[in-house]
Amino acid sequence: MSQHLCISATFLAGRYHGKEWPPSPARLFQALVAGVKTGVFRQQWPSVESVLRGLEQLPAPEIVARNADRLSGYRISVPNNDTDRAAREWALGKEFDASRLRTMKEVQPREIGASSDGKPHVYYFWKLPGDAPDIASVQQLASFLHTLGWGVDMAYADAFLADDQYTQTVSAQDGYSKYVPSPTGMRRPIPVPGYLDDICAAYQRYCKRHTSTGVDAFTRARNYGEQPYRRVLTAMPPVATFLLRQLDNTGAWFSMPWAFSMRVAAWMRHAVAEALREEGYNELEINEYVLGHGGDGHRRHMSFVPLPSIGGPHADGAVRRVMLVEPGDADGAISELLQWKLAPSVLHLLLESNGGPRRTAPVCSLAEGSRNDPVISSYLPSAPRRVWHSVTPLILHGHNSLRGKFSLRKTEELLYQAFNRRRFGHACPRTSSKVAALSRRREISAGSGWTGTSRHRKALRDRFVCYSTTRRRVISRHSALIVTLVWSVHRITVAIYPQAAQWERRHTTSVRRRSSADAHFLLGLLRHLR
């Protein structure tokens, strides 16, 4: 049975302000270094330095964390790190109020549910390849931790050795989720050999960032590794969520009727392509992975999903949010890049150029979305669901119009062809049983409310057959009475008015056109008498 080194952390206020959840292994490593470098704890640096260098050598840990929900966001005014501007003014002998250098910062903390027995909020399990380290030194290092995340995220930590059974027991706790390293998933920074030296060098650069030539903004540690993580028992692909805002008022919603959601998808696709071009991605990859063109673009590409407003008592179905979805086997690097790059960007509408250069016009702006949003959470639930309803929009591979009008029959045939190409077709003998089974389980079916389908027509026949038969009989009886009445008036009028008889002989040329002549005669007679 293998052994694991476990470091657990508990947040005193039950809140976490960091960007990712759970906190990445590199963030925990930084917090441990900051703890031992604080105050009198620096005296213990020689005894715990070897522990930190040992953590650099270990593979990426497994993480077990309590589920956390995002709270409502708010904005605060903070100083803007632009002291160069003030220094230039002061060097010229001008007065400048540095307190005016302020900017608005978005804050959206996570609330971590407290367990009834006071268990830690997050566990990190490193699998030990050989002998166990000095656990007393690891516990001493963990006791120095005072914050994890922002400066307001006060926390404390503990360290101990655990076996496989304990790891499984912790992972099975109610309200907790397990995150394991995987080939694909959301990428998280991890400590690697040399990361400790890079952190110490970054601190020295920060202390000496002010010089006579200006301020050195490059003070962060960059020598870390990246490891994709996935949540166990979930198959959630990498996503990025955004809110649609008005151009002149970023606090107001921009809405688009759900019937025009394809326009929002087109705006997002264009914005993503332009953003990746700015980041240096090659044109072939953009055409296939983003635009869906080329050989591989039809099999593996990004999806642009407008999200209609649902889930509330006042939901109107308008599109105010949009989501970018990568394929399930993607590592999530592009969605994570686009999440922060597109959040302050503007979506553009493509205008008619009449053969000239491409012209665009701004439509709306984007803001960063969160999974705690009431609408987004309906599409991305925090926990697996056992019962759900789904509506899948389809882009047909052919035209579904007939003589310029929408044809439900052609639409139905195109759907069956699409199922057949994906080996769910009714025309393929090998897969007809699959379609029948899926239809019986109502996984794929043309609902009875879909007007024009064969199933709907059958339902109408079964429901209204008696009414239709009675209605046809009534109409036939009324038609006979009307024809008899018109013909009687016609013959009486011919007998009384000679001009009417002459008009009839002039417009009636054969017995076979008698019924048509009756109608023309009646209309002409009414005009003559009027």
Image: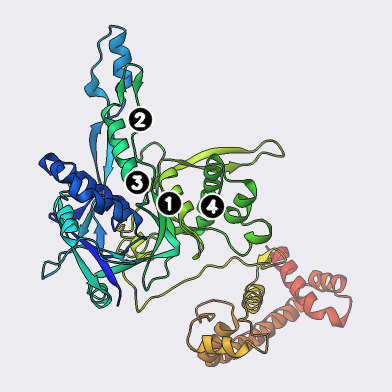
Whether residues under marks 2 and 4 lie with C-beta atoms below 8 angstroms apart, the answer is: no
Tag 3, which secondary structure?
helix
When the figure is inspected, residue 107 is found, relative to residue 494, above or below; the finding is: above
Q: Nearer the viewer, mark 3 or mark 4?
A: 3
Q: Residues within 10 Å of mark 4 (few under 14, many from 20)?
A: some
What residue is drawn where x is 66% and y is 65%?
405
Answer left or right for 272 relative to 163: right
When the figure is inspected, residue 462 is found, relative to residue 515, above or below; the finding is: below
User: N-terminal of the two: label 1 or label 3?
Assistant: 3
Q: Residues within 10 Å of mark 1 (few under 14, many from 20)?
A: some
Q: Nearer the viewer, mark 1 or mark 4?
A: 1
Q: Amino acid at mark 4?
A: Arg
Q: Residues within 10 Å of mark 3 (few under 14, many from 20)?
A: many
Gap in angstroms between the C-alphas marked 2 and 1: 23 Å
What residue is drawn where x is 35% and y is 30%?
217
In this figure, which residue is indicated by the disc labeled 4?
263
What residue is drawn where x is 36% and y is 17%?
213
Query: Seen from this angle, which residue lies furthest top?
Result: 93
Q: Residues within 10 Å of mark 2 (few under 14, many from 20)?
A: few
Location of the C terminus by quadrant is: bottom right
When the figure is inspected, residue 386 is found, relative to residue 77, above or below; the finding is: below
In this figure, which residue is indicated by the disc labeled 2?
217
In this figure, which residue is indicated by the disc labeled 3?
195
Q: Nearer the viewer, mark 1 or mark 3?
A: 3
The picture quadrant where one finds residue 262 is: bottom right
The dot on residue 336 is: 1
Tag 2, which secondary structure?
loop
Gap in angstroms between the C-alphas marked 1 and 4: 24 Å
Q: Nearer the viewer, mark 2 or mark 4?
A: 2
Answer left or right for 2 relative to 119: right
